[in-house]
Image (cartoon, rainbow, N blue to C red):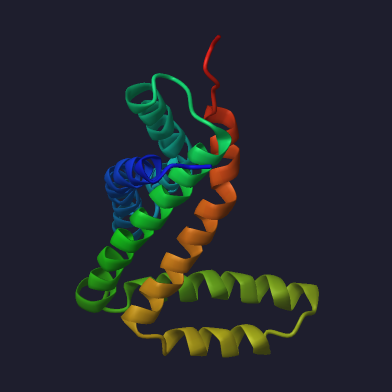
Amino acid sequence: MIKIEDFIQVKAFARQDGAFLALLWTLSFAAMMFMPESTIGNLLALATPFFVGWRLCSFRNYALDGAISLRRGYCFSVYTFVYASIIFAVVQFLYFKFLDHGTFFTTLQASATALENAYSQAGVSTDDLKTTLKLMQELSPINWAFIFMMQNMLTGVIVGLPIAVMCRRTKRQ
């Protein structure tokens, strides 16, 4: 059974590390939006599980004397993703509302055009793709931010378990 003090401690450290993770995601997003030809944005995004694992090990070693259970590690990982997702959603909303001016959708449309060519060559109808693209164009900045926030939280729930498994350590007797 987890004590309330332990839960408060996990959440406090996860909030701090969630802010750092949101910063990592913001740098990744900025690199993808402003330097789309570069792979830096993708590399920063792919560094997410390693970053969270590193922060989990730091939490384990600093606050818990080098031992952490799977449950507490998973809780820390998920909360880190949740807090980072909320902060990053605010950043994305501000970007889509004030800075984007259609850049994101243009990039999305270019990707869809490439898919459309592949679908046509395979003999698959592209009507659904065109309808989906039209619907996506009508989404507001708050909708985009919310979609990405939910996606990031779901990613945290899924990726948090392997991170917790890799970083757990029991007390030595």
Residue 114 image-quadrant placement: bottom right
Image quadrant occupied by the C terminus? top right
Q: Residue furthest top?
A: 173
Q: Is residue 102 left or right of residue 139?
A: left
Residue 106's spot in the image, x, y percent? 40, 75
Residue 90's spot in the image, x, y percent? 27, 67
**Residue at position x 32%, y 24% from top?**
62
Residue 38's spot in the image, x, y percent? 38, 48
Which of 86 and 169 lies nearest the eye of the viewer? Answer: 169
Q: Is residue 68 above or below residue 130?
A: above
Q: Is residue 6 left or right of residue 112?
A: left
Q: How many marks?
A: 0
**Residue at position x 47%, y 50% from top?**
78
Q: Is residue 69 above or below residue 90?
A: above
Residue 84 image-quadrant placement: bottom left
Which of 87 and 95 lies nearest the eye of the viewer? Answer: 87
Residue 105's spot in the image, x, y percent? 40, 76
**Residue at position x 59%, y 52% from top?**
158
Q: Is residue 171 left or right of residue 59?
A: right
The reply to whether residue 106 is visible in this rendering is: no
The reply to whether residue 151 is visible in this rendering is: yes
